[in-house]
Image (cartoon, coloured by chain):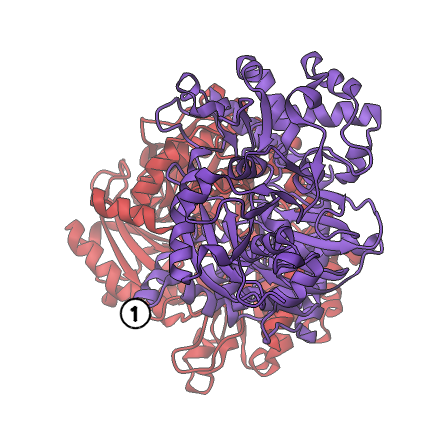
Chain colours: A purple, B red
């Protein structure tokens, strides 16, 4: 029994890191401290370096250490928990966000020599500049009929580990030569905390071509990609991978001191933010689709058996919960589309009404959109403002709004955009179900569900499924990280031996849920049919206008 | 020689009427007076009557007389021209805008009994509620292979005379019984001025199934539409029609007194605003496409011979200039789309910049949009916010914007909307040219070209043709009306015997023109190809999603 014991969870998001202190006994979160990354997301230029090309997105790994130094002591202090009562530390990270490092763990970008070299930094998950490399990987893998390609639903993404590594080799061979290790930032962080380079199976499985029982593709495959890559696994990546919840090592004296914890505190193997959220949403069995809803949405699902589902981000044995297949799908922009609309599409009359009501304009939009009936706007949209991640896996797809008349109002467009993202989720659910992987209910967490009741009801109505909300909603990844810290500590030390046990004790959902309204669901069946037809027409080669327009845009911007 | 002689032109637009005094000798416009219609466009309710159904648009004919009483004396006074020097009066009107009247010309809606009855009012050109009736007309005409249907490019519009008449009979048979005459408002106005009901061939030819040398379809056809319509021509419409520029009669004593003109002043047969603009733009020969650009755009073209062009609004012998075939095509929303965007799509940062610059926000949008290269936005749109008039003739088509990303900005959408309307014009030009009717240059008039240099340049670049601007731009219909007044007066009275002669003396274009830029035209060739593919996919049955969404919207709004 874990009475009086605590774990530390550290969640690394896109813009900031968060440290939480959680009671092992019941998952109660005693404190939470957020620290933004000083250099943020570098997508236009390096602080002291050159301007970046379009589609780049970098981070400075020094910022991750800054979070450890600032957020952890603050969370500890706020929780009033003593260092000796913290029995474990778990972390989670965005993925795939890999970086080059020296053999001792020093990031290349921390060396003065490389401070102005973009390829020396972390390539954040949303770095989209490695598409030519991803195309080459897919081509070679298809020719060779590589196992990993089937696992990734037929396409390896430009966002993933080896696309980014190949881009370094293509564009900055000197950086490729200078790096001893190319490593996920999440694994690098655990290495910093423990002094041991122990990489996790989750990121490797979902983003890094690694398959349980098989390991990586052969040197032949890598040589076919690039002659110099032949021995990349042995030389720079490593062959040994550790399962989720495993113990990476004890906290180093130096980091124990800086964070105010005890030396040797167990640190769990690295994890991925979306994956760690699943048990934190109480889900450790098949049937419940977890949606981590923020700027983008990740869909996580457990299955009893291996199925190849179209356009998955990954299908990994033990990838989320040991003993089950973990499926990951996603929508590359959801909250981001609404933010785009808030910034670029909201007319004066909404702002004026907001001033009259003394309310944020988003509240006015939501109120007006909520007053509309499904189908009343006459609009349908395709939610591809940032391409399509699942099921089409195509970053060159773009957004569509169809059905405008002279009477169309802003709140109708807003509602159509929400509906489009719900149709995107339904498309993913149908891809799962077409392979016999059932989705009985949805469990949502993340920042988006908090204030968007209309959005949640539309998702319930569109999917025809009840939606539960995680508790806590916004810090569920941090909770999941902490839960893995409890598993790394183990039952003998006051933690748990399995993540399933940790979930039973530490995770919960809110009592209020969103239930589908039958008559709305019937209308959305029709609208989804229209979405589906347009989805296939524009997304499956019926009309590749989006790609041609993107090419033209590139040509015209370069000239 | 017409030295010292003047003509009065009265132009009836959608929102207001305008009177101008023009010197016959050289077309110099001495004065111009605009009077808005007191009841305006009634599209939501009658002033003292019930709420109107969607798609209705009515006017009160009493407002037209109000224009005569207010605008004409004001224009005369401002011009300092003496009544005895005004040798003729010409008018032009929107079309088809028909109305029911008693045998003495009293509008039904002017009778207290019918003041609250919507069907007793003028059905304005943009009244779109007679689509079921238009469908029936098209069905019956197709079955019977009626000549007029070929002339209208294969479809008779819901905006036109008999669709609206049939709607009265369907929905308000008592009004049908009570009316002695069903007449175009433009012909009714000439009737008021002269005391003679003399109808014009132009409106009848373009909107009323009337064909030179054939007259109307047979009573059999009308009976097939509705048993009670069998003798509608003889009973309520009339068989005698008068050519453009002909003399309708002399001004009545009563109207001469009210307007401050001489009794018996020659009044020309009624005309249509778009058609009368053609000679006022100097065009009396084939090869020059006149674009009357405002909330919508009318395209007028002259041809040597009869050709059936897809989706024309009409093809009428002598319909614009005697001796030539007059072709009319159109786009049902152009300025209206920009107005929609100004009202519903312009975000805060444009308004803020406008305040900083102390400029209208439209100027900021235009400046930003003008800084973009063709193709740079990655967007393409379909300009169907108010359906498609030519070449698809389908009011149930709706607008599309395609290509949005998270980086898309308001000025890019604005530019894409302008480009979409230019692609719509190019579609019409290509329909003409596919039948061997050449379009060598464009001549623009109307309110839109005045302040929209970017728009005009885009039209030149998209169509690959030089664009001239009429002089005056905005009052060219009023000038054209006045020119027809000079023809009605005749050379003997100091006017002209033909409209060609009047155009040579009274009409002119501006010296500055818009010439296509070759490299822009090349990019627009690509973008037009994309527009064209989407146009045919959504407009020709590839995917009838727009109609299904409109139907769903109707169902959902009714419930």
In the image shown, does B20 or A467 lie closer to the viewer?
A467
What number of labels is visible?
1
| Residue sitting at x 26%, y 66% | B69
In the image shown, does A245 or B493 lie closer to the viewer?
A245
Identify the element where label 1 is drawn. Answer: helix
Locate the N terminus of chain B and report the quarter of the image it occupies. Answer: top left
Please state the horizontal and vertical placement of residue A550, each as a whole percent of the image: 57, 31
The image quadrant that residue A24 belongs to is bottom right
A478 to B166, vertically: above or below? above
A487 to B483, vertically: above or below? below
B342 to A269, vertically: above or below? below
In the image shown, does B527 or B237 lie closer to the viewer?
B527
Please state the horizontal and vertical placement of residue A290, each as a whole percent of the image: 66, 58
Find disc 1 in the rendering and name its residue.
Answer: A356
Please state the horizontal and vertical placement of residue A533, each as a whole percent of the image: 73, 50
| Residue sitting at x 37%, y 33% | B370
Q: Is residue A557 left or right of residue B502?
A: right
Please state the horizontal and vertical placement of residue B334, each as a whole percent of the image: 46, 47
């Amino acid at each position: 029994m874990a009475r009086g014991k605590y774990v530390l969870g550290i969640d690394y998001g896109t813009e900031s890191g968060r440290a939480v202190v959680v009671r092992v006994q019941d998952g109660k979160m005693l404190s939470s401290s957020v620290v933004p990354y000083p250099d943020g997301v570098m997508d236009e230029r390096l602080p002291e370096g050159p301007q970046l090309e379009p589609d780049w997105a970098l981070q400075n790994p020094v910022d991750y250490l800054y979070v450890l130094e600032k957020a952890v002591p603050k969370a500890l202090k706020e929780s009033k928990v003593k260092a000796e009562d913290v029995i474990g530390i778990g972390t989670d990270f965005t993925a795939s966000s890999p970086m080059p490092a020296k053999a001792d763990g020093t990031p290349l970008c921390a060396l003065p020599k490389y401070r102005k070299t973009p390829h020396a930094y972390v390539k954040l998950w949303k770095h989209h500049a490695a598409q030519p490399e991803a195309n080459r990987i897919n081509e070679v893998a298809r020719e060779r009929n590589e196992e990993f390609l089937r696992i990734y639903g037929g396409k390896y993404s430009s966002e993933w580990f080896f696309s980014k590594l190949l881009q370094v080799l293509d564009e900055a061979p000197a950086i490729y030569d200078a790096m001893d290790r190319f490593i996920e930032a999440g694994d690098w962080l655990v290495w910093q905390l423990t002094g041991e380079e122990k990489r996790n199976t989750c990121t490797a499985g979902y983003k890094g071509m690694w398959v349980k029982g098989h390991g990586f593709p052969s040197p032949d495959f890598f040589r076919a990609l690039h002659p110099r890559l032949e021995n990349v696994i042995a030389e720079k990546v490593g062959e040994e991978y550790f399962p989720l919840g495993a113990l990476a090592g004890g906290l180093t004296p130096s980091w124990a001191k800086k964070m105010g914890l005890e030396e040797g505190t167990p640190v769990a193997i690295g994890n991925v933010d979306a994956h760690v959220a699943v048990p934190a949403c109480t889900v450790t069995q098949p049937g419940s689709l977890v949606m981590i809803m923020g700027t983008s949405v990740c869909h996580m699902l457990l299955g009893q058996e291996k199925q190849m589902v179209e356009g998955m981000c990954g299908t990994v044995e033990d990838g989320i919960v040991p003993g089950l297949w973990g499926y990951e799908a996603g929508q590359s922009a959801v909250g981001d589309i609404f933010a785009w609309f808030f910034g670029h599409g909201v007319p004066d009359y909404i702002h004026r009404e907001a001033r009259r009501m003394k309310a944020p304009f988003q509240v006015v939009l939501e109120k007006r959109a909520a007053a509309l009936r499904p189908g009343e706007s006459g609009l349908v949209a395709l939610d591809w403002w940032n391409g399509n991640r699942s099921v089409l896996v195509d970053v060159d797809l773009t957004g569509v709004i169809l059905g405008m008349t002279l009477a169309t109002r802003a709140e109708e467009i807003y509602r159509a955009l929400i509906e489009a993202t719900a149709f995107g989720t339904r498309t993913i659910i149908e891809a799962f179900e077409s392979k016999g992987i059932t989705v009985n209910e949805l469990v949502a967490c993340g920042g988006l569900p908090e204030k968007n009741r209309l959005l949640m009801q539309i998702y319930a109505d569109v999917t025809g499924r009840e939606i539960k909300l995680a508790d806590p909603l916004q810090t569920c990844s941090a909770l999941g990280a902490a839960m893995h810290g409890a598993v790394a500590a183990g039952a003998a030390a006051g933690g748990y031996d399995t993540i399933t046990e940790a979930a039973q004790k530490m995770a919960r959902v809110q009592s209020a849920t969103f239930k589908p309204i039958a008559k709305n669901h019937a209308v959305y069946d029709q609208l989804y049919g229209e979405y589906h037809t347009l989805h296939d027409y524009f997304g499956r080669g019926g009309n590749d206008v989006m790609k041609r327009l993107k090419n033209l845009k590139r040509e015209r911007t370069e000239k």
